[in-house]
């Protein structure tokens, strides 16, 4: 799985996720800090990355356009620090990797994880 972390997540996540074997980049490594969300989505789709974010705008773009990708992982938590969230997120990635690879929105929050296949209807 190839993961693109948006600007709302710490670059510290890159090393954590790479250590688990995922090809991971932070948006700051490939694009501008003021890039609009549609630019980030276009880059992710063109380069076959899944967007990892805590911003709901990315799933809204998928819903509005009925796009089949890129996949988006939404983290809905207050504490986004890798030290706190990494074990849960890594477990969720392992559990839903096939769905994310096929095109999905994966939401992780206090209630657990939910996945919706793309395109949204």
Image (spheres, rainbow, N blue to C red):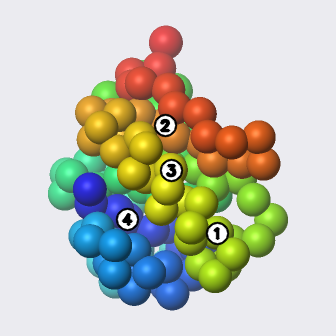
Please tell me which of labels 4 and 1 falls first in the chain: 4
Q: Circle 1 sits in a helix, a strand or a loop, which is it?
A: helix
Q: Are marks 4 and 1 in contact (CB under 8 Å)?
A: no
Q: Residues within 10 Å of mark 3 (few under 14, many from 20)?
A: some
Q: Which mark is residue 64?
A: none
Residue 99 sits above or below residue 73 on the image:
above
Residue 35: tell me if it is visible: no
In percent of width and height, residue 72 lies at 46, 46
Q: Is residue 73 visible?
A: yes
Dot placed on the residue nearer the N-terminal end, 2 or 3? 3
Question: How would you rate the neighbour count of disc 4 (Cα within 10 Å): few for under 14, some for 14-19, many for 20 or more?
Answer: many
Image x and y of residue 7, in percent:
54, 73
Per the image, the residue denoted by label 3 is 92
Circle 1/circle 2 CB separation < 8 Å: no
Q: What residue is drawn where x is 26% and y is 71%?
A: 21
Task: Label 2: state its secondary structure.
Answer: strand
Q: Nearer the viewer, residue 84 or 116?
A: 84
Q: Is residue 64 left or right of residue 23?
A: right
Which quadrant would residue 40 be assigned to in this image? bottom left
Which residue in the protein does label 4 denote?
4
Q: Nearer the viewer, mark 4 or mark 3?
A: 3
Q: Nearer the viewer, residue 11 or 41?
A: 11
The residue beneath circle 2 is 105
Q: Earlier in the sequence, mark 4 or mark 3?
A: 4
Q: Name the residue that disc number 1 marks.
A: 85
Along the horizontal axis of the image, is 74 left or right of 15? right
């Amino acid at each position: 799985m190839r993961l693109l972390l948006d600007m709302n997540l710490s670059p510290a996540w890159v090393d954590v996720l790479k250590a688990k074997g995922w090809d991971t980049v932070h948006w700051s490594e490939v694009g501008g800090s003021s890039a609009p969300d549609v630019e980030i989505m276009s880059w992710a789709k063109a380069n076959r990355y899944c967007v990892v974010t805590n911003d709901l705008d990315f799933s809204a773009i998928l819903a509005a356009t009925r796009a089949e990708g890129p996949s988006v992982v939404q983290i809905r938590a207050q504490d986004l620090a890798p030290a706190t969230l990494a074990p849960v997120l890594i477990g969720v990635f392992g559990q839903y990797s096939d769905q994310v690879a096929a095109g999905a929105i994966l939401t992780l929050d206090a209630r657990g994880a939910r996945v919706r296949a793309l395109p949204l209807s």
